[in-house]
Amino acid sequence: MQIQGTTVTALTKARETGPQNLMQLWMGEVGVSQVMPRYSAMAKSGFIYTARGALQQLSLAGTAMTGLVVWNSSTPVNGVDLHILKISGNVAVTSATMTGIALARGTGQASAPTSTTAASAYGNNYLGGAAGSGNAYTVATVAVAPVAMWDVLHNTAAIATTGEDVGFYEDLEGSVVVPPGGIITFVALGAASAAAAVNLGIMWAELPV
């Protein structure tokens, strides 16, 4: 691979004074700063978004979904993929018959879900940044029922009287990618949760297809 540019031993203020430089090390390596965490540059560029469903009833897998649903509204041509970075959630209200929560995926949603309610919170992680292509809902009717991918929480009768306080907080590092027309969501296992019982969150990056 050929890299062209000025070889320097320290980064100059090139963004302010002229063409940007690469810091090339003595064996030809390109210097990369790890001063900021790995998602910081994407957040600064306005590519990362977060959605939350607060105290929702989580449904079983089906076409009428409740909890937190994120749909990639972009198109395959000049669209974006949603790279799922983090997921979180807990059970705040007694839900003894809901034995667990699973992350789930859906495809084939070419047009917007119907009968929707907006997510409890949604926004660009660059505060004040523009909205993205990921549309987030706490209630949505989708074209195809989502399929559970893997379990993220086990809820048992022994802890159901007080809810599941620890919950889950998983760093997926972009290993789940939602293409245009795809859906990422959560589903209840065993039975739907009680009303206003579950808190859920998803953070993703939007990058070109």
Image (tube, rainbow, N blue to C red):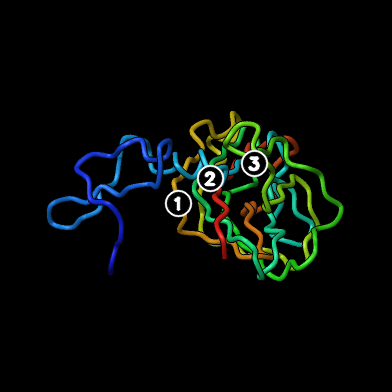
**Residue indicated by mark 2:** 87
| Residue 204: % across, % down | 55, 48
Few, some or many residues within 10 Å of mark 1 (<14, 14–19, 20+): some
127 on left or right of 26: right
Pick whichever of labels 1 and 3 is earlier in the sequence. Answer: 3
In this rendering, would 23 be left or right of 63? left
Q: Give the x, y percent position of residue 168.
A: 49, 40
Residue 172 is tagged as 1
Q: Disc 1 and disc 3: Cα gap in Å? A: 16 Å
Q: Where is residue 165 drawn, in percent x and y? A: 53, 31
Q: Amino acid at mark 3?
A: Ala
According to the picture, the residue beneath numbered tag 3 turns out to be 51
Query: Label 1 sits on what residue type?
Result: Leu
Name which residue type carries label 2: Ile
What's the distance in space between the residues labelled 2 and 1, CA to CA?
8 Å
Place residue 38 in its image quadrant. top left
Local SS, label 1:
strand
